[in-house]
Amino acid sequence: MSGAVWVDPVSDTALVAAVTAGFRGEFGADPEGVWTAPGRVNLIGEHVDYADGLSLPVALPHRTVVAVRRRGDGMLRCASSLGGPPWYGRVEEIGPGSPSGWASYLAGVVWAMRREGLLGNDFGGADVCVESSVPVGAGLSSSAALECALALALAELSGLPTDDAGRAALAACCVRAENEIALAPTGGMDQAVALRARAGHALLVDSADGSATPVPLDLAGEGLALLVIDTRAPHQLVDGQYAQRRKSVEEAAARLGFASLREAADAGTDMRELTDPTLTRRARHVVTEIVRVRETLALMASGRYRELGPVLTASHVSLRDDFEVSCAELDCVVEAAVAAGAYGARMTGGGFGGSAVALVEASAVDAVAESVSGAARSRGLTEPRFLAAVPSDPARRVVAGRVGRVV
Ligand code: GAF
């Protein structure tokens, strides 16, 4: 029997029941509807989105739901069972850092959609209640799921287009919400996958041209599984380290005379021209990671999924040694997963804590999880939790009575 701890997805039905009850309890009425958006795990292409690079994230079956009802008095009222007390404020008063905390991601979306002209100046506010099965602070994009579920809700309620172009515009608003109101200087990969993913696929996010292309990822058909390992080492993107990395990458591109490191790499620039050893290593990570994404795409196209393993592990080594965004917990679970037979493993997301992802034979998932748990225990680290990353669907309205994918 496995002693590993699993975080299972929650069905739409259960999330809707919980969020509707929460909405009634807080606001004393029924919502107009419920919308859902997924967390994500990034297969490969890490810390390259803000360098105009290529990423391959996958939408998780773990989702966030928002229940929404429009108001007419300019108030935004946000409640959640997840974090902190409710936040009530005027739409007009939303601004950088205000509100702070979890409500900033919701308020930021309203602010950005107004700034971008998607919501009119006459937008009358809304009541919003949140439930989620995306682990918070695990580097699995719980904040983007929150933003994107609300953005889609407000778009549909306002009759805005929600085709791929409409979703790309909403994703851009969510990035502004995160950067300018929540004050986390992140790129756009997480919002792209939350709004534009396709079930059964990874999403090739090209941050240079804004395209998002689904790439088939039939791991189950190949007898494989993507195992997410949440180290439970706290992960924060607003603590300065992420911002420093982004700054280094932008500085490296500027010193080389390019708008982005992607452009510098495409022009065949040698990163050693940078001379500063730290900047050279940071830039080398970005450039080699983009090459690894291309290798991954080539292997996927020819169905050679098991050969992805070493590419994933090389990505981890680069993030650990050149980009320096790993930590003892992430290194431990990556090494333990590979030692237990995973084809490859790497940290995923922003790093400095959070989660890793491993490519594993489906029949070996429990044994690998057990070994990884044992390795963490034996090193006195917090015991990790595990999620099965079945490539799932993007943000959508929850259809009443629809049976959830997994309970
Ligand atoms: C976080 C950010 F939000 C993303 O934009 C991306 O930069 C990622 O870290 C690292 O690849 O999830």
Image (cartoon, rainbow, N blue to C red):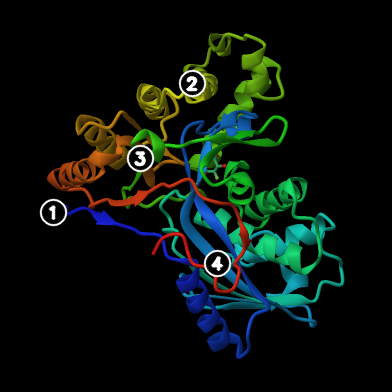
Instruction: Give the answer, above or below, for where 45 lies relative to 193.
Output: above
Question: Under tag 4, what secondary structure?
Answer: strand
Disc 3 C-beta below 8 A from ligand 1: no
Of the two numbered discs 3 and 2 on the same chain, state the one appearing first in sequence. Answer: 3
Q: Foreground mark, 4 or 1?
A: 1
Question: Under tag 2, what secondary structure?
Answer: loop
Mark 4 and mark 2 in contact? Answer it, CB < 8 Å. no
Residue 6 position in % (x across, y down) = 29, 56
Of the two numbered discs 2 and 1 on the same chain, state the one appearing first in sequence. Answer: 1
* Numbered badge on residue 225: 3
Of the two numbered discs 4 and 1 on the same chain, state the one appearing first in sequence. Answer: 1
| Local crowd size for mark 4, using a 10 Å CA cut-off: few (<14), some (14–19), many (≥20) | many
Disc 4 C-beta below 8 A from ligand 1: no
| Local crowd size for mark 2, using a 10 Å CA cut-off: few (<14), some (14–19), many (≥20) | few
Alpha carbon separation for disc pair 2 and 1: 36 Å
Q: Amino acid at mark 4?
A: Val
Quarter of the figure that contains the N terminus: bottom left
Alpha carbon separation for disc pair 4 and 2: 36 Å
Tell me: 232 left or right of 122. Answer: left
According to the picture, the residue beneath numbered tag 4 turns out to be 65
Q: Residue at x 35, y 51 (%)?
A: 387
According to the picture, the residue beneath numbered tag 2 turns out to be 302
Foreground pick, 257 / 207: 207
Q: Foreground mark, 4 or 2?
A: 2
Quarter of the figure that contains the C terminus: bottom left
* Numbered badge on residue 1: 1
Q: Amino acid at mark 2?
A: Ser
Q: Foreground mark, 2 or 1?
A: 2
Alpha carbon separation for disc pair 4 and 1: 33 Å
